[in-house]
Amino acid sequence: MTDDHADSADLPVSDRVLLDLSAAGDRTSFEQLVRRHGPSLTRYARRMLRDEGDVSEVVQDTFVVAWKQSSSFRGESTVRTWLFSICSRKIVDSRRVKRAQPMPDWLLEPAHVGRALDPHVFASNQEFVSALEKALAELPPRQRASWVLREIEGMTFPQIGVALSLSADGVRGHHLRARNALSLRMARWK
């Protein structure tokens, strides 16, 4: 018999199964959810908040709420969307006290900048990132959130609607306005 088929232990466990196990008190399953979704929640929070301390606090609070409410998850959305919904509410809570500021340029830089990269290309990329961050910071919060969740996190309009407590059509409107505003502000790079 050949080993052509993957062992069932090698298959990734679904978010829902991990959340159900977490609700039963399995910390290891919850840690898997944190490792799986923490980076995307952090990217989202960085684009919405002023400083790294606020980002860390929001993401941590998101997972604390998720842990405490894991048994009450109704499954009306994906676990990922549910986590973004919690994170969005935590961002709003954080923003009540502080205003948003663009994330540092280095967060959008390529992870591995090779030595062969043309200095002109590198400088152009830096200038583009700076202009994009400035343009994003000028958008109203819901437009910025809609654009970031759609364009960077790849979420669907209905998922974003759940995360931001908006209808899918409302998200589409915010996203369209954000795209139009960014298109005008970023016309130099077209």
Image (cartoon, rainbow, N blue to C red):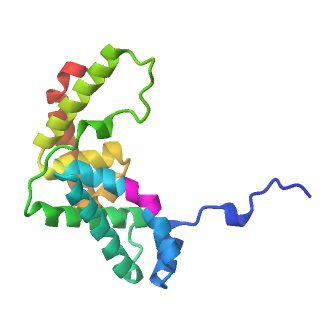
Task: Pick out the residue farthest to the right.
Answer: 1
> Taking 94 as reference, is 70 left or right?
right
Q: Quadrant of the C terminus?
A: top left
- Highlighted magenta segment, given as a residue range: 35-39
> Taking 19 as reference, is 153 left or right?
left
The percent coordinates of residue 145 (x first, y second) are: 22, 51
Q: Per the image, is 42 magenta?
A: no
Secondary structure, magenta segment, majority class: helix
Can the viewer see residue 119 in this picture?
yes
Q: Nearer the viewer, residue 162 or 113?
A: 113
Q: Nearer the viewer, residue 178 or 101?
A: 101
Residue at screen point 32% across, 74% down: 64
The percent coordinates of residue 129 (x first, y second) are: 25, 31
The percent coordinates of residue 158 (x first, y second) are: 33, 57
Above or below, 51 relative to 34: above
Residue at screen point 27% across, 60% down: 56
Q: Nearer the viewer, residue 43 or 123?
A: 123
> Taking 169 as reference, is 73 left or right?
right
Question: Quarter of the image holding residue 41?
Answer: bottom left
Can the viewer see residue 165 in this picture?
no
Residue at screen point 35% across, 67% down: 82
Above or below, 96 relative to 23: above
Q: Quadrant of the N terminus?
A: bottom right
